[in-house]
Image (spheres, rainbow, N blue to C red):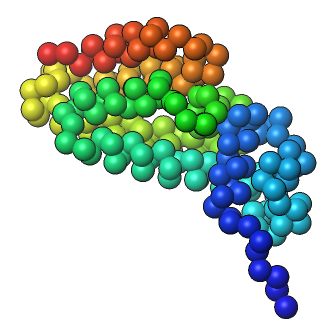
Amino acid sequence: MTRSKEFDEREVLLKAMHLFWEKGYEKTSLQDLVTHMGIHRRSLYDTFGDKHSLFVKTMEQYDIQTNATIKAEVSRGRTAKQAIRFIFDYLIEVNDDRPLGCLFVNSATELGLRDPEVREMTNEGFNNEEKILVSLIQKGQQSGEIQSDKDTKILAASLQTTMIGLRVLARTFTDKKRLHQVADASIAILDV
């Protein structure tokens, strides 16, 4: 007879995600995961597979969670520039119990060169983020809010590069006023 799980799979996955996000893949041991998730080692293996499989699942969960939040907020009747401003503010003004920075950016810098699966996931995440920015810029160009004589993909890539930089700085640099100034300068490239 199979034993039923004595834990909420999503809840323990979120705990693992936060631990990987805070410590990184290499510095998170299996014992750290077992302790932090509050489950037995056997349950971890039976439910999530090995450490790498668990890590990949946490990245998938992070991607779903982040995209849902950003897409929901961006679609709340904001103008294109207001939506882009929201995304920058969201990256800077993290006020909950989340670790600093971004799990995807952290993972790309830690593992991207040597782990093809992580590289593919982070590249896909960055590409999806850029598509959101391209769509917002096109919306702003159609409404006359954003310069229409500039290439939307170049503008989106420039904004995204700043966003990635802000997520790196957010881990070590706590002057939010300065981070907002950097965001302002980046968003200014959209001015008509």
**Residue 183: percent from the left, percent from the top?**
39, 16
Kindly tell me whether residue 153 is visible in this rendering: no
Q: Quadrant of residue 191?
A: top left
Q: Which quadrant holds residue 50?
A: bottom right
Asked if residue 101 can be seen in this view, the reply is: yes
Question: 129 and 28: which one is in front?
Answer: 28
Please give left or right for residue 190 compared with residue 133 in the image: left
93 is higher (above) or lower (below) than 25: above
Residue nearest the observer in this picture, 90 or 57:
90
Which quarter of the figure has residue 182?
A: top left
> Residue sitting at 82 percent across and 86 percent down?
2
In the image, 20: left or right of 64? right
Horizontal side of 97 relative to 3 (left or right) equals left
Left or right relative to 136: residue 95: right
Q: Position of residue 158 (x, y in %)?
A: 38, 21
- Residue 120 rendering spot, x and y as whole percentages: 59, 45
Residue at 75 percent across and 63 percent down: it is 48
Give the percent coordinates (x, y) of residue 153: 31, 30
Residue at the location (66% across, 58% down)? Answer: 11
